[in-house]
Amino acid sequence: MEKRTRNLRLIGRDEVSLGELIHRAVRKTIEQAVDEELRAVLGAGPYERLPERSGYRNGDKTRRLTGPTGPVELTLPRGRLAKDNGGTEEFRSTVVPRYQRRMREINEAVAGVYLAGGNTRRIRGALRPLLKNAPLSKSAVSRIVSTLRGDWETWRTQSLADLNVVYLYLDAIALKVRSAGRVNGLPVLAAVAVLADGTKRLVSLEVCGSESGDAWEGFLQGLIARGLKAPRLCIIDGNAGLHRAITLAWRTTKIQRCAVHKLRNILRKVPQRAHDEVVADFHLIVYASGLDPARVARDAFVKKWSKRCSGAADSLNEAGDELLTFYSFPKEQWKTIRTTNVIERINEEFRRRVKTQGSFPSEDCAVVLLYSLVASGQINLRRLDGYEKIVDVITQEDQAA
């Protein structure tokens, strides 16, 4: 028993020292890498006098770099490099760039926790095993997160000409943005495309002052300017301006009105006590076995509720056949293409992750963060249900054309 206890103590001591050994190895590896880099640039090692030598060493300097094992105190070589036109210039390492205080992995971890909804205090807590005693200020977090802006700028202007878009979801996401000392609710117009392989891709985000017809028309023209071809189907809510913008931009594109939005609008017209009955009758329409049974259920709904609550019947009639467009597509896809729930889920996930922030300091900050959540996989866009049948949709539409 005593021998076993002694062995356990030895193991524990080795485990404690293991972290220190790794830390020293990291420091030694970085220092050696920078030294080798300087050797390659100079064309000679320390004290070597060679004709091809292009400069000289100039002592060393200390740097503090936070990496996966915590803050590392580095002793890095300095050097002066010969210039083509005479004179010398200071050697600058690419292994440990000038002003760098954290390794890329640490910056990526900070951005990841930020995208998950963490503020500076929570980031420090989540990354304490990595940061140890290394400082991490609000301004440092802001600088790290600002690197996401470059990806956003590239994404929002990239060409869409090569995309074979089958379906396009269009809706607005509400954000709270601080402007001129006040917090305002602004809509972010969003477009999610379904490609020929069934994958969903966020293709555009744009902050607008309102969800007007002109705003939607400009939004769609921006997509067209980037090369987006007419989709086979657009899934939208009941916004009349958006509907008009689609018909002007893509005359051959079919429109599916979101069943969830329509049900909400209908329920606004009826008293609370009748909600369950209205929902049941509405579901007979959108959950029918096909187009003909759906039309029969719709006629029954109108006949019944025209007498009891004409507003509900009028609201249903307003959508017309565009509420039933999805029935002309493969049955395996009905569940996904009869609503704009794809964008609704993005909205819900976004709100959940940023609820600790209240409002955003600028429009750009809000949209960059929203894009980054999707691009990084924090908000996942899964493949369309029944994607195997998309080839049938493309073939059918091409034959009709």
Image (spheres, rainbow, N blue to C red):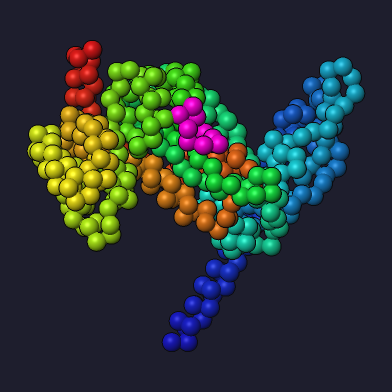
Q: Position of residue 141 (x, y in %)?
A: 65, 50
Dividing the image into 4 quarters, which one contains the C terminus?
A: top left
Quadrant assignment, res 252: top left
Q: Nearer the viewer, residue 56 or 325?
A: 325
Q: Position of residue 362 (x, y in %)?
A: 63, 43
- Residue at 9%, 34% in the rendered image: 292
- Residue at 69%, 62% in the rendered image: 133
Image height of 13 relative to 233, above or below:
below
Q: In the image, 117: left or right of 262?
A: right
Quadrant assignment, res 300: top left
Instruction: Confirm whether the magenta stretch covers residue 45.
Output: no
Instruction: Confirm whether the magenta stretch covers residue 211.
Output: yes
- Which residue in the rendered view is the most extreme toward the front? 307
- Residue at 39%, 19% in the rendered image: 248
Image height of 181 relative to 191, above or below:
below
Q: Which residues are magenta?
A: 206-215
